[in-house]
Image (spheres, rainbow, N blue to C red):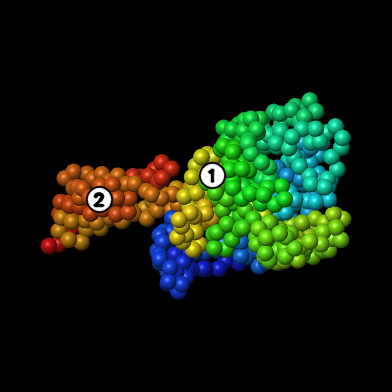
Amino acid sequence: MSHGSLFRRVFVPSMSTVLLSALVACGAPEEESPTPEPVGQAQQALEPSDPLFNSQRWHYNLIRAPQAWDLTTGSSAVTVAVLDSGRLQHPDLSAKWVGGYDFVEGQPDPTDVGTYHHGIHVAGTIAATANNGTGGVGVCWGCKLMPVRIAQAGGSISSGSPGANDPLTTVMARGIWYAAGYAVDDGRGNVVQAPARASVINISLGNIPAPCPADLQSAINGAVAAGVPVVVAAGNRDSSMQTSNFANYLWGSCQNVISVAAANEKSDYESYSAQGPGVTLGAPGGDEYRTNPYAKTGEAGFGALIGCTDPEEMRGIGTHGIVSSWTTSQGVHCNRHWAGTSMAAPHVSGTIGLMRSRNASLTPAQIKTLLTSTARWVIPCVGPVCPPKTLDAHAAVSASRFDAIAVSCTSTQSNLFQCSVTKAGGLAPFTGAWTMVAPAGVYSQYVNNPDQSYGICTPGVMTTATVTVTDALGRAQTRSSTFLCSSTP
């Protein structure tokens, strides 16, 4: 496929080769990758030309985004709903916004009217425009964004508005119903409905104590029933949450969500991240120690501004956060480093956007299985308690489709044959089912082998072998190979 001259393709060593070299160097035990690749195999990577892309490399390299982009860069038919602080016309985002609603004020314009534009950074990680000569790039740069305003730190929320009178979780539930395509009361008695259902919902708001309110759980269940996965930031340990135990956070008690912890470059938890049983997977969150030296140890941090200054926001000076779009309190559009589980979740939402760009029929349950089954530890965890594995965008996007199989059979020795199978995409483990035209037959130990088979045939007779290979999601491919049974002794 052609992506034009703005893109640069590079070949990188396979992950198995890189990990094997690293493990041998440090004397660590070997661990099998969840998606094994032949040692030495090169992978093609697609790199955008955006000026800040190299500033983002560490976290996009961690999830193998450039390799995923060689499979797809997203589709305009895929929309990620950003339930956050609203939209602004940032140059990396202005062409991406579609639809949306403001459930804070209860009105149709979801413009971010505050001074602290959290949702702009989140949206940039999901789908910032690529190859436009400015800023950075999003994980699913070909996708669209639906701005759903549900919260605004430091914003102007008028007295009597739904956002002022109702719990945040209730406003959040309305936003979920809306993004999932349902008609919903906006809190002022107006019934509103999105013109089109989102493909995935991102909620980078996690610092709320458990339990999960019934109205919020009902909205989540409704979204999943409509085929829309809900991705949430696990939460940060800060002044509002003095614990890192995920069970004590809002999303730790909600069901049917894809919860994302903040991971570092070793696939371990960032110290500020909510953690423990129930977290679905990890994704890059940024390092609080290098991002904000003034933060308390173990808290998420504010990173350096890039291309602008803001007298109202001078806390961040570090440069190892997640680089994404930003708008200052004075309305200047630029970029910045930032750290938190809020930054981790959009990596997963963007990856789901890529997955749905390749296979729109994936269900939320299948998506969650694909994400968790293909995730990996960069350095194997030796336990006894391990963090969740870290997002592998390339493996998840590759496995989102089970495109085809190819079967090749040969017979070079009298009455014996062998067959081999190559697969495109799909999720391991695979199963196989071989059938032959009598009197030929497959040896019993290879009847269910998805990779190869051996058997006997009648010398000098054209013979057909057929195999059906099924992946872990139950997707099946059937192919046949016809060959001449050898008469050579």
Dividing the picture into quadrants, the one containing residue 20 is bottom left
Q: Earlier in the sequence, mark 1 or mark 2?
A: 1
State the image coordinates of residue 79 (x, y, percent, origin top left): 65, 44
Give the vertical position of 49 relative to 348 (above or below).
Answer: below
Q: Residue furthest top?
A: 189
| Crowding near the residue tagged with mark 1, few <14, some 14–19, many ≥20 C-alpha atoms within 10 Å | some
Give the vertical position of 230 relative to 41 (above or below).
Answer: above
In front: 314, or 459? 314
Could you tell me which quadrant the C terminus lies in?
bottom left
Q: Is residue 351 visible?
A: no
Residue at the image point whose x is 81% and y is 62% from the top: 314
Give the label on residue 446, or none. 2
Q: Residue furthest left?
A: 489
The residue type indicated by label 2 comes to Tyr
Q: Is residue 101 left or right of residue 247?
A: right
Dividing the picture into quadrants, the one containing residue 356 is top right
Q: Helix, strand or loop at disc 2?
A: helix
Residue at the image point whose x is 63% and y is 49% from the top: 243
Residue at the image point whose x is 67% and y is 64% from the top: 289
Q: Helix, strand or loop at disc 1?
A: loop
For label 1, the residue is 278
In front: 68, or 379? 379
State the image coordinates of residue 157 (x, y, percent, origin top left): 84, 40
State the separation of the CA atoms marked 1 and 2: 39 Å
Residue at the image point whose x is 15% and y is 55% from the top: 415
Q: Residue furthest front?
A: 242
State the image coordinates of residue 277 (x, y, percent, origin top left): 52, 46
The residue type indicated by label 1 comes to Gly
In front: 360, or 302? 302
Give the label on residue 239, or none. none
| Crowding near the residue tagged with mark 2, few <14, some 14–19, many ≥20 C-alpha atoms within 10 Å | some
